[in-house]
Amino acid sequence: MGRPLKQVIREHSEQHALSTDQLERLEALMAVNKPRRAGRYNRMSSLISWSAAAVIASLLAVIVLFQPGPFEDIPMTERIALEVAHNHIKLKPLDMETDSMDGIRRYFTDLEFVPAESSLLANVDRGLLGGRYCSIQSVPAAQLRITSPDGNHLQTLYQTEYRKDVFGMLPVLENGDAPVTINVKGITVRIWVEKGLLFAHVS
Amino acid sequence: MLDQKALQRLYRYGFSLTRDEDAAYDLLQDALEISLRKAPDNTAAVMRYIQRIMRNRFIDQYRHDHRHPTVSFNDNDNQPVNIDPQVLEDIVIAEHEVESIMTMLEPLEHELLFFWAVEGYTAQEIADRIDSTRGTVLSRIHRLRQKILRYQASGEVGVKGGAE
């Protein structure tokens, strides 16, 4: 029996919905990156706003980190590896193209950190193609695309500010730690902290 | 901060473009990441801002994936029209036919249907959201109707037009 196109399209659309897990991840993304406002509120309202934001962020963090779900018992390094490998495979278009780290630093000005070179990846400039904004575990990050030294493969280097409250303890290069190497989805991910930044290299 | 209802609306908008649940989620997440840096203050403006980012990123991705696209995203066929904005209202389809209809439509036709059927926007409101004109939107609605009716006539699905 026929029904109005509008009604059928509406019902068809409503069949598709974010899962509870996806909603929580997006809410955590918004809570972690809540825009900062300055000079528009008095001290008391600002204090209340920040307190409320802190409570919401804490609750969301507790929900996301401690609820049983697909990431239960998965170490943080593996979660990071899965996330960056997933993004690497998708090979989304670059936000900007450049062959220099200076170009990268000039573009990524909306981050809470300044993109840097790593001593583990000498001459990144040589194969740099460009970058795009992304996030790791809901923390804003820069995703740099580079060609492998032999020129045959694309690699991705992620970097973001190292937040212990989000990422926990990770190997710090300056402390003599070695990067964690994880193989997921058929690719190798190395994760380490250097210069106060978290690096994840997918090759 | 957007509530869950707003996130679901944006997700469904993403699905109308991509026709893929994972891609719709990625599109929404990307747009949220960008919007969080420079988003307007009020929720309605944020919704429009994020929708615009999703649309632009989808078009970029589509062009990236289709090196020789057959779909035009340059909507400049601004024909002077006397088209009834209700032109889609009388089309009747069977519920099981919706998938086959959606399969034969182009991404921006999905978007048009979403804005019209799900969001309930007028032609002018749709035009505002896609940086076009009301006349162009009406032309597209008219062509969409013709396309669905032609599809019906071909016998590929059991779509029928209602009272003319």
Image: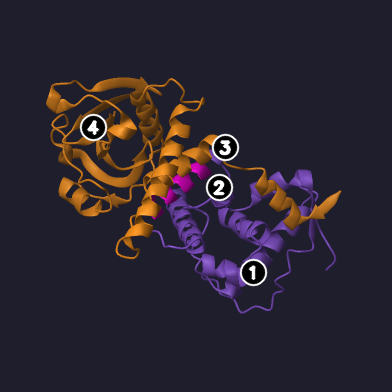
Of badges 3 and 4, nearer the viewer stands 3
Of badges 1 and 4, nearer the viewer stands 1
Q: CA distance from mark 3 to mark 4?
A: 37 Å
* Amino acid type, callout 4: Ser
* Amino acid type, callout 3: Ser
Proximity of marks 3 and 4: CB atoms separated by less than 8 Å: no
* Amino acid type, callout 1: Thr
Residue wearing tag 1: B122
Residue wearing tag 2: B4
Of badges 3 and 1, nearer the viewer stands 3
What's the residue at 75%, 54% (across, down)?
A: A7
Which one of the lettered chains is coloured orange? A
Residue wearing tag 3: A19
Dominant SS type (magenta): helix
Residue range in magenta is B23-35
Residue wearing tag 4: A148
* Amino acid type, callout 2: Gln
